[in-house]
Image (cartoon, rainbow, N blue to C red):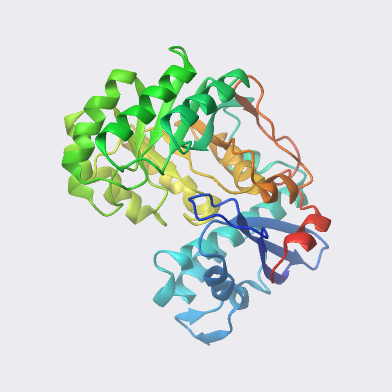
Amino acid sequence: MKVTKVEAIYLRQPDVKVQCDSGQDALIVRVETDAGITGIGEVDSSPMAVKGAIEGPYSHTAAAGLASLVVGEDPFETEKIWQKMYRGNIYGGRRGVGIHAMSGIDIALWDIKGKALGMPVWKLLGGGFHNSIRCYASSLFGPTPKKTGDLARRYRDQGFGAVKFGWDPMGQDEKTDIALVREARQGLGDDADLLIDAGLVWDSKTAQQRARAFSDFNIFWLEEPLRPDDYEGYRKLAESTTVRIAAGEEESNRQSFVDLMDRGKIDVVQVDLTRCGGFTEAMKISSLAWDRGLPVANHGFTTYVNVMAALHWLNSIPNAMICEFVAEEETNLRESITRQKLRARDGYLDIPREPGLGIELDEDAVNKYRVC
């Protein structure tokens, strides 16, 4: 079997709000083979930059469009293809968009392998740790503390035992920050886990102050309070509090995660398969975390393709902690573009059993939202 085509598909809602909701558009990767088997993947990044990285022409041996490197290859040779893509685009692809683009292709290749062999990806990865995995409802903060409390009650009533709120309006001032967390806790009640995503808003001293204040509300973790490269700030924060410090969604390969773990001393390693290099790299990152005694969780605020990939990965590693599951209700694209619609039951997601990723695109919706 050989790869015959690699396509980057940009989908976008008609109205995109100015907020940190990466589910308002999507970059889907489709890989076709001469055996008639097609795999899909996803990339959460700057969509058109990724499309260029994939579909751009061959320039020279260290700056090549990724599709030009993958067409003609055997999709079963995922490690070889990963290294070929990395080396063939090393000028622009050592971090960031280049690795992001590789992620979508790698996920699609594993989807092909699973479909060809009639097995779910997690089984090919050697997994089987779970039948279902705990998830948390992931949401942006409400526009006010009161609205955040109302959202918390809604997610609690839907059966979630863990809920995360993040980004705006966190970071405006101390009073608002504390009120947001207080109202979220009041809405959830005492028995559910409350996760807080600060959204890169503070310096280390402020983050230490907020961690102390938030500990009064028994938060499960404090996520990404600092700029991703502020390793010294992360170290000071992590060593100053008993609150778990979580980070990693900005990282795009294992060397960056090593810095975050060893220099930043974080407590929970968050890996987005659509940014870190796909399954091939995520398995290595989770092993590095395991060696350091650290749990991992996925990051994913985009489509169900991302979530399904994460479920396969989390079922394939011994240090999986919890799964992010977007609970935002206003995003049409996320709910529309795949035939399968994922639903949590009592705060858990079932592990996929179908071959490959176990999820397929709805071509009518793809045509509806497709930009290019």
Q: Is residue 274 left or right of residue 172?
A: right
Quarter of the rendering containing residue 265: top left
In the rendered image, the quadrant that contains the N terminus is bottom right
Which residue appears farthest toward the bottom when viewing the image?
A: 59
Q: Is residue 108 above or below residue 90?
A: above
The residue sitting at 41% across, 46% down in the picture is 285
Where's residue 328, x and y in %?
59, 39
The residue sitting at 38% across, 30% down in the picture is 180
Q: Nearer the viewer, residue 111 or 260?
A: 260
Q: Nearer the viewer, residue 21 or 80?
A: 21
Quarter of the rendering containing residue 197: top left
Quarter of the rendering containing residue 233: top left
Q: Is residue 213 left or right of residue 236?
A: right
Where's residue 196, x and y in %?
39, 33
Q: Nearer the viewer, residue 308 or 331?
A: 331
In the rendered image, the quadrant that contains the C terminus is bottom right
Q: How many marks?
A: 0
Where's residue 188, x and y in %?
48, 19
Where's residue 229, x and y in %?
27, 54
Q: Is residue 321 visible?
A: no
Q: Is residue 59 left or right of residue 206?
A: right
The residue sitting at 43% across, 34% down in the picture is 144
Q: Is residue 74 visible?
A: yes
Q: Is residue 329 above or below residue 22?
A: above
The residue sitting at 58% across, 27% down in the picture is 133
